Image (cartoon, helix red, strand yellow):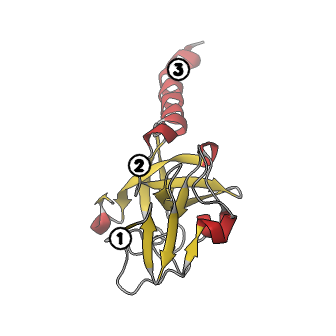
Amino acid sequence: MKYIKEYVPYLIVILVILLIKKFVVTPVIVSGDSMYSTLHDKDVMILNRLYKPKDIKRYDIIVIRYNKKNIIKRVIGLPGDTIECVDNQLYVNGKVIKEEYLDKGTITNDFSLQDLFDVDTVPEGKFFVLGDNREVSLDSRSIGFIEPKDIEGQATFTIFPFNRFGAKK
């Protein structure tokens, strides 16, 4: 009985840490170059699990569960948006989008939602995401629209390496 009383505080601390990690925040590691130059391979970020689909805004960086792996992408299209790329220029709802987060020289092949999915707009309750390094990114152009149930949370704060520490946009 003495041992149980001695270890109960440690078990409580471990339980609290596990609950925070599961439901509040947890580290996530960037894998690959699809978000370069905003994010780098092996960057460690904080995943905000309290972030909900109703909170999603254009340009948010989110973590998506795809094929039992986490992938990190940028939200480009919200429900009802039209999206197309013509001559390396992205248009959302017919307006030119200035993508200051892209590396100079990034190439985005022409596409439209009509070409990709035979629809004119992002369906209700779904999202369209792209990687910042479009030439190597596995994103909505190939995996389709993102459903809220597949969104793990938002990742905007890098904690490692320390020279990249801070919020990412």
Residue 154 left/right relative to 163: right
Q: Disc 2 residue type? A: Lys
Residue located beneath label 3 in the image: 8
Q: Name which residue lies at 57% across and 75% down.
A: 111
Q: Going from the N terminus, do you reach mark 3 or mark 2 first?
A: 3
Q: Is residue 14 above or below residue 91?
A: above
Q: Secondary structure at mark 1?
A: loop
User: Dot 2 lies on which element?
Assistant: loop
Q: Residue furthest right?
A: 67
Label 3 Cα neighbours within 10 Å, binned few <14 / some 14-19 / many ≥20: few
Label drawn at residue 57: 2
Find the distance from the CA under tag 2 to the CA under tag 1. Answer: 15 Å
In the rendered image, the residue lying farthest to the top is: 1
> Residue at position x 60%, y 65% from top?
113
Residue 36 x, y percent position in the rendering: 43, 74
Is there a contact, CB below 8 Å, between mark 3 and mark 2? no
